[in-house]
Image (cartoon, coloured by chain):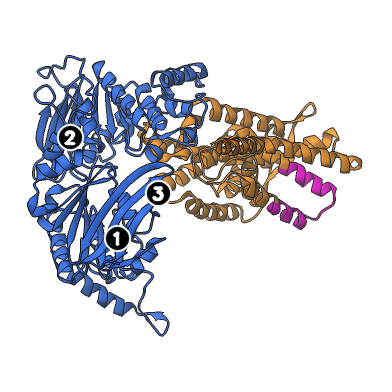
Chain colours: A orange, B blue
Amino acid sequence: MAEKKLQRSESNTLRILREYAIYFIMLGIFIIFAIFLRDKGFLSGVNIMNIFRQTAMISIMAVGFTFLLASGEFDLSIGSTVALSALVGALVLQRAGIIPAVLAALALGAVVGVINGALVVKVRMPSFLATIATMGIIHGFARWITHLQAVPVTNDRFTYIFGAGNIGPISTLFIWTILAVVVGHFVMAKTSFGRKVLAAGGNKTAAIFSGINVTNVKWLLFIAMGMIAALAGLLYTGRLHAARYTYGEADLFTVVAAVVIGGNSIYGGKGTVIGALIGSIILGMINNGLILFVFSLDQQVIFRGVIILIAVALSPKE
Amino acid sequence: MENTNDAILKMSGINKDFSGVQVLFDVDFELKRGEVHAIIGQNGAGKSVLMKILNGVFPRSGGTIEVDGKEVNFSNPQDASNAGIGMIYQEFSLIPTMSVARNIFLNREIKKAGLTADSEMLAQSKAILEDLGVDINPKTVLRDLSVSHKQLVEIGKVVSQDKKIIIMDEPTASLTKGEVEILNKVIKRLKQKGISIIYISHHLNEIFDVCDRVTVLRDGKKILTEKVADVDLSKLIEAMIGKKMASGTVYETKYQIDRSAPPKLEIDDLDLGGSQKVSFKLWPGEVLGLAGLMGAGQDRIIKAIFGILPELEKDMALDGKPVNIKRPEDSLKYKITMVPEERQTQGLVVDHTIKSNINLSILDRLKGILFINDRKANAVSKKYVDELNVVTDSIFKKVKFLSGGNQQKVVIAKNLAAEPDIMILNDPNFGVDVGAKQEILQLVRRFADTGKSAIFISSEFEEVGQVCDRVLVLKDGVIVDEIYRDKEPITEQSLLTAVQ
């Protein structure tokens, strides 16, 4: 009996360690880089802001993805939604103003979400398969809409708001990130909607028996995810003063990695938005560090894959 | 060694304890060649433990088992199978995505030159099923069959393996009357071939149709073994429940139930597929019991009310106003809640805390303008944890670390938090420890005594008698009897007799 109790408390300590491991890891990596990359300016304010700038879109999408994953669903089409909404936004911007452009991009994201959600909750396809298919379709549209041509953006106010501007030393991208994380965190942790998401992913049957409309909850999450991907598309467009069909191509991989490293379970029922942000920052720091260490792009990609494997191996299992 | 040449199986002095808790006491059981021998008893009497020992699932703590005069020690079901013992499981051991023929020959496929001989297996499967007198195409994919046909395939699979002893655990639970007759014919055919059958069932009447002898177990002890011709139903029931007639405390009704007043709930013409449709009323202050054997329809009634089986046609009225409940979400709006059968898979999010489980049904009520009012959420959780005496050090403990009884209390707390007018409880005491059982029964009674209504199902008829004001007795989807507490005492014995 006493032995059993001991084992329990041991595993409790382990669980607590695991829960906060992510913070220690972030700190550890930061310290290592700060020491070894001291001469290359890792600690400079410009470089730190650069890390945030580079991870902003990932962090923002990770917020949406955390919700989907918490409800037990996936959306693999986010990368191609980024590209298509960037192009649509930029094209509308050339012909009309900022507001129509933003509305058009967000509407596109919403439509993608409505379709993804319908396929999952109404047609009852596994989200994994449904969104692989829509990913391909959206990617096709993104290539087709401008025949692979980039769409330049010259509207300064647009680029200022969506990523290229700075307020003092602070990038507008940083503000967007903080906004997304704060809203996401409070919705997840403090609203009844957040509880419904967690219940839907934790035990769908119990959620339904408790009177929760799981169908609507999940559908709403897909729509929100589509719109968040569209926002990321606008941010890429603003930051780089142009829209391209290649935007977001590698983002799915990084977003999933950030969310999982952040301590979210791929089995649903758990969701930490702050964790996802930290996961994203860790990946951003590693990326930044690898560049400063002068690793090639290929090597960076390999490295990131290894990191994901380690993170998933450490994450709690069923 | 003594060799009784007509006994194919002899289990002597079987004892079994699970970490110190004795569940079988010196049980003797003998099966003759070509005999159909029934084992009956209440839940927890030890039937399934005894069969699992025979089948090599559990090791025994004491006693001997002889098959065909030779002492045997099975350490797994494969050993038992090799010795000629086959088991037909209640939950089917079939692969839903495979054809009937592939299922029948699973893991013992007929091969020619190393390849599976599919046409040969099809032909043999056809012969096996025809021999049983059932008309099933062996090419059919299993999941396309009805539940009862699946059961017959399962029987065919075991029968075709040349077993000497076949254990049938509740074989008729999912069969219709016509199919039960098919099964009876199959059993007679097996007998003629000299195969012996152990027949476990709660349907006592069936035993008189097909069995030669019957053994009754109670609380882990063998009470009697008799030829079925020498016993009758009342003797069997008496043996099953013993002399402890007024055992459980009866929780008295404190609310003045007025059945001339308009009812809280009215169900009309609910079609459960029986010969008649089901209609009944539920009044404020009542705990209404639904009693029947497995598959008699009690679970479908509550699922129809709660919106899990909206396809079952019915007219439903609350406080005299017609309502249409299509999903559980609607039920909650009409203040109907349910304590489901499977607390872990249907009632709780076990990885979440007590608090978040209790709050699950009332999230919208806890909401402020934007955010959940955390103080209120804590207060509600705390209130019910105290009121229901959930044993835990905090409301932030994950539910999976609670005992079965405390988990069930959390489910009930979740229901009560939603302030229901009608609470449906489906076997709430299954797998709950003795102390918590009584507390849960009292909770149900107290709930109704505040003028609310409850619908109560239990696999323990004793409990039905302890709390219910009125019991509807169901058989094959039809209400066959209605017992009022204030007219005659509702006892385990009266219910056991009524449901047969």
Dominant SS in magenta: helix
Q: State the residue in front, A44 or B29.
A: B29
CB atoms of marks 3 and 2 within 8 Å: no
Q: State the residue in front, B485 or A173.
A: B485
Q: Which mark is residue A124?
A: 3
Residue at 58% in and 31% down: A184
**Closer to the eye: label 2 or 1:** 2
| Residue A240 visible to the viewer | no
Q: Residues within 10 Å of mark 1 (few under 14, many from 20)?
A: many
> In the rendered view, does B204 fall on the left or right side of B385?
left
Q: Position of residue A297 (x, y in %)?
A: 77, 55
Q: Residue pushed farthest front?
A: B1
Q: Position of residue A35 (x, y in %)?
A: 87, 40
Q: The numbered mark 3 sits on a residue in which chain? A: A
Quarter of image, res A64 = top right
Find numbered disc 3 in the image and state the secondary structure of the residue it sits on: loop
Same-chain check, marks 3 and 2: no
Name the amino acid, label 1.
Met
Find numbered disc 2 in the image and state the secondary structure of the residue it sits on: loop
Q: State the residue in front, A255 or B4.
A: B4
Residue at 67% in and 50% down: A310
Q: The numbered mark 2 sits on a residue in which chain? A: B
What's drawn in magenta, residue-wise? Answer: A283-306
Residue denoted by label 1:
B87
Name the amino acid, label 2.
Lys
> In the rendered view, does B189 fall on the left or right side of A76?
left
Q: Position of residue B298 (x, y in %)?
A: 20, 39
Residue denoted by label 2:
B243
**Closer to the eye: label 3 or 2:** 2
Name the N-terminal-most of marks 2 and 1: 1
